[in-house]
Amino acid sequence: MPKQEPKQVLVTGVGGQLGHSIQVRANQYPQFDFVFVDHTEFDLAYPNAISTYLADKAFDYILNCAAYTAVDKAESELSLVDQVNHLAVKQLAEWAQKNTAYLVHISTDYVFDGCHYQPYTESHPTDAINAYGLSKLNNENAVVASLANATVIRTSWVYSEYGNNFVKTMLRLGSERDQLNVIFDQIGSPTYAGDLADAMLTLISQHHQGIYSHEGCEFFHYSNEGVCSWYDFAKAIFELSDIVCDAQPIETKDYPTPAKRPHFSLLNKAKIRESLHVNVPYWKDSLALCLANLQETTHG
């Protein structure tokens, strides 16, 4: 039998947490030839940059990890967040449909209003309460409308060894201060970017093998298992890192921000577990792994 050529995979946002996490795992997947781009080569803020880059390319898969994620800033940069998170994704989805590529796109728990008190399933009605969430909801609708073969994965509270995130902020502030106020009335689950990267790579591997297939756009939820508040998350970071810092619980109203946050945004992961048989680790286990990797990087 002739050897099959590797499938071509475009990964956007390699400068971010998720894109970088996919990059460090790419060599485990010889059936794919990965092309990684960041905003210097593939800037979602400029429609012409997207169309120019894709004009002479042929990709079998697109893993869109690029996004505008500054939730509070989004409230005052409405056109930019709409372009990057909505219109650029619409453009990608339409290209994917036209060129028979499979699109895997990342969305957010912020498409929900946070007023539900059971883990959100993929079919739960959406109702974004801030500009960032609305831009993501609009891009979900655009992917569906494009008729592209696609999977949208909603995730939450992403952190990793790379870039800026809550874990790294707590490590820094916890080392600088004796006491820290952290919100306790926003409930969800953190997502280690390495786990989400593994799930995405499992998805395209199973699609490539014909194990997983569907028509149109499929939705999945993926975050780590378990439930916590930002306060619980901070406490765990300090405990696992042996940082002596007195974390004090405060209410959302005591820490006003430009963007309103959902109070409850826990995601139900049953569908992705059953469909892809992916591993969904407990959030504290993944946090411990990430912290160990960070320590190794710092002291290694």
Image (cartoon, rainbow, N blue to C red):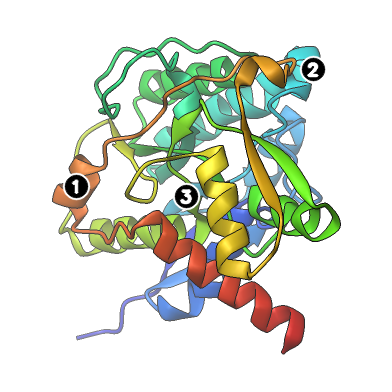
Of 282 and 83, the residue lying toward us: 282
Residue to which mark 2 is pinned? 77
- Give residue 257's position: percent from left, percent from top: 73, 18
* Up-down relation of residue 193 to residue 129 (above or below): below
- Give residue 15's position: percent from left, percent from top: 71, 56
**Quarter the N terminus occupies:** bottom left
Which residue type does callout 2 highlight? Glu
Between the C-alphas of marks 2 and 1, the distance is 38 Å
Q: Nearer the viewer, mark 3 or mark 2?
A: 3
Q: Classify 10 Å Cα crowding around label 2: few (below 14), some (14-19), many (20 and above).
A: few
Residue to which mark 3 is pinned? 191
Of 54 and 284, the residue lying toward us: 284
Q: Nearer the viewer, mark 2 or mark 1?
A: 2
Q: Which of the 4 image quadrants contains residue 277?
A: bottom left
Q: Which of the 4 image quadrants contains residue 125?
A: top left
Residue at the spot x=37%, y=74% of the render?
Answer: 31
